[in-house]
Amino acid sequence: MEERHVYQVGDKVLHSDFGEGLVVEIRDRAFYDILEVVFPGGVKRLTSIHPLLQPKPVVVEPPPPRPRRRRPRPVKRKGKDPARLSYLSLDGSAWDLIDRVGKGKVDPLEDYHLHLDAEEMVTRRGFENLLCLDRLSGVDQLDYQKQACLRVLREMRGRGLLADEVGLGKTIEAGMVLKEYMLRGLVQRVLVLVPASLTNQWREELQTKFGLDFVIAGRRGDWAEHDLLICSLDTAKTARNRHRLLTKAFDLVIVDEAHRLRNHQTLAWKFVAALNSKYLLLLTATPVQNDLRELYNLVNLLRPGTLGTYRSFRRRYMVRGDKRLPKNTAELSRLLSGVMIRTTRSKTDIKFPLRRVYIVPFQLTPEERRLYDAVTLFVRDRFTDSDRAQFLKWHFVSMVLQKEIGSSTPAAQHTLGRARNDPRYRNHREELNRLYELSRQVTRHAKLQGLLEILSKADDKAIIFTQFKSTMEFLSARLREAGYTTVVFHGGMPTADKDQAIRTFRDKVRILVSTEAGGEGRNLHFCQKVVNYDLPWNPMKVEQRIGRVHRLGQTGDIEIYNFSTENTVESHVLEILHRKIDMFELVIGEMDMVLGDFAEKKSFEAAIFHIWAAARNRRELERRFRDLGDQLSMNRKRYESVRSLDEEIFGG
Amino acid sequence: MGRPARVRIPARYRWMADLLARAGATLRDSSDGVHTYDLGPELGGFLRRERVCITFRKRTGERDGVELASPGSWFHDQLLRYARERGRVAEGYLAPRDDVDREGLLRSRRRGFREIVDLRERRYGTLLVFTFRVSFYSELSEEQLQHVTFDCERGRAIRKPILRQLFLTRPEAPAEDFGAPRKPNIKKAFAAAWEVLENQVETRVRELQEKGQPYLEEKVAQVERYYRQLLAEEKRLLKSRASRRGQDESRGRIDLLKLEWERRVKEETERLKPQVVASLSAVGRVWVPLERWRCRVENGQGPETRDIWLDLARNETWEAPPSGNGTR
């Protein structure tokens, strides 16, 4: 597909009616520019995508004739484009083979014949088989996923809405389609648009499961040059990035959580509609949330006209007076089947294992409590500092400190030790020294004792999650002292070491102590016990932890232990997640739906910290946490009603 | 090298047995429809196991520790993958046939043939067999395996494909009294083979386009219908609008819809156009025994001598041009 031209002031243009002109002004619009062009007949205002307008070709002196090449080379070696037929391309590996023939590096003749036989057998099966299946790692390859992939490839010709219920692996299906297209040489440039909170997860999954190295597009950097891009929808639609992405031609665009495109008047919808992409996959478990128009808008992104104009769609398929109720459902289903795939759990044999959730309450030891309260006071003082510069300087550090003290004393001690020697924080050196000394007085760790008790009750494998490396090291050392075999796993380890750690855990040791980054994309379903030694304030991270073991392929029931220490931030977070929204009963993937706007960036974490640090007294603190819980509780109810609506519309 | 020893399994699974034997696997036991193989280091490393018990019977395959190996099974797919990663470049000699009627063949090549003068040259020539896997991605998707043979002596692709059986009956070493082949220009050969492939693909794509035309037309018509409807709705709105500003807005929207219409039709046509991806699967270099004979022929103005090449393996002849020796 040809790329759109980006005009600059001073560019010469050609218009088939007005002749040659000069661009004198450009007004930036969402998906095209308005150009003011001076033609011999006067000034005209045109859109930059006007079909009769084109940039005037720059006349370049022809280069001196090159000497004739002795050897003809009809096919470009790297460009892969054939000499004559635009639709025919040659797989790049051909040249390696040609080189091998030239160098006389040959295989035995028997292998050649067996190779040709194998090729014939594979060819007979044609497009019935998926090439990607052999190249996936750590993917269960369920039958309904393969069928979905084949339907997208064959029937939908690469433009489809994957609307499986939560937890059935839409990401895997999209990855399979992507990999299949890439293996067949039909896709080279890919853009994956996801919520900001999922960019890393997507990159990790595409890398570990599909062997594809994607680059995350940020606000800065030269990412636009890469062919495999992951970008958050919010980042992509900013004025600067929008322009860069819209002028690029993609072979495939994947939009995760595509229900964010339900409104055709939003910038996000318009942006995706204006993207130049041959294939488009939209992923959402809830294609209809409030109104059938949302479904119409999604389908219109994929294939405009499939459902007619909105006016005719409303007349034909919507019950008058009820925007959620469809009519002529058989016909609507038939039309949708050409663009949408929806698998529900009831249509599969998938049985998710049971989750048993235990809240393990603790009282901090007197020394721990003294330290916790002192740190909290210090954090609140910094947070309410009227000096803006001081506030900004301390904001991040104080939030980390508050999280660390909720995790373990050694984690906080590590930061306090560094901060008290840091000249940037010299104004508070005295307080930091005092806090550090308090941390040194902590000799008994309430949660550690509890952990040892839990581990002593059974001898099965367990993953202990913590947010901080210092806590991880502390736990690992103490567990070894207590006679347990452990292995650690954290984000700073090289990939090979990570793989080795997982193998060691699987084959040799009983306990894996891991930080958040631990295990993303790696299969840990041989373990059934998860201990949340500390609790991240971001529920998506909690979900990711559980998702490491509670996933397709897990055969046993899961035990989740959540440590909760009284009167800490974490106890409030747990109260909201467990009691208000029953988070631990949700299927992996549903938390994102419940969080709604909170899922973006770090807003939930920020809200938690703000409530904790800004509360003037205990009553206010509890009221504000209660309000937050109520809000999430409403979100959950809303999500459930959306889920039942979708079941009603599409069948459960 | 002889063909690997065959085990007692149905003929349609012979390929698998051949492959297992070729990969160094040894059959330890074969009873009750279960064949136990020690896989050896290479195949064992590939499959990440040392031993495998396979069966071709579906019911037996349900037993614990027994792997179903029929086509379509995981094991069969893995062996296909193993085979396809290997044996991509090979070379071999074709044996001269014993029953070649040299004079008869030379006579049939040239009208006015009078007699053989002498044998000028005896050496091997080169045929290059390019095997392409061609994937057509369109409304009617399909894959084909195309073999294109390039005759390096004559400098052109030949119609008759080299038969696999012929290639199999090759001798282990060149015949003693045949000279070495000339070094072929492989890139030139590939260029010519690619051109042949392009012609074949072009023909097939034309057929596919004809077959897929109704589908394409239907999809494009759907888009066109949609935009036509949208335009009609917008034009109705324009008529009903009283304010100048509202009318301008509608006109602007109509302009934009027209642009979008054009863009969407173009995109849809582009997307539904057949796409073809060819990959070079294997290259075989075949050495054929050749003889160049000088013959006396009658050309209408009197006798003259001409050189004629004779392919002793495939019973083919071709005339060398008057200048040069007929090879390129």
Image: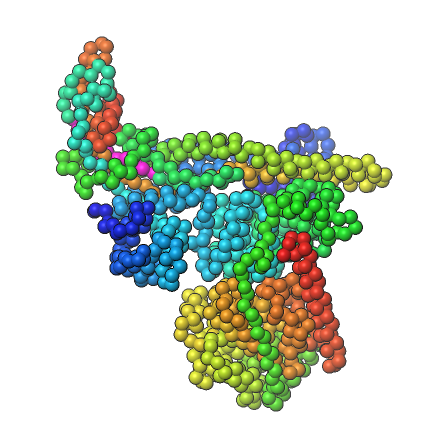
Percent x, y of residue A128 = 46, 46
Q: Is residue A408 above or below residue B47?
A: below
Percent x, y of residue A267 = 69, 51
* Horizontal side, residue A72 vs residue A385: left or right: left
* Horizontal side, residue A643 vs residue B247: left or right: left
Seen at 48% across and 51% down, the residue is A179
The residue range painted magenta reads B120-130
Seen at 63% across and 41% down, the residue is A7
Seen at 72% across and 66% down, the residue is A634
Give the quarter of the image for residue A599.
Answer: bottom right
Seen at 77% across and 36% down, the residue is B235
Percent x, y of residue A59 = 55, 33
Q: Nearer the viewer, residue A72 or A143?
A: A143
Give the quarter of the image for residue B155.
Answer: top left
Q: Is residue B261 above or below residue A475?
A: above
Question: In this rendering, does residue A9 appear at all?
Answer: no
Give the quarter of the image for residue A351.
Answer: bottom right
Q: Within the magenta stretch, is there residue B88?
A: no
Question: In this rendering, does residue A180 appear at all?
Answer: yes
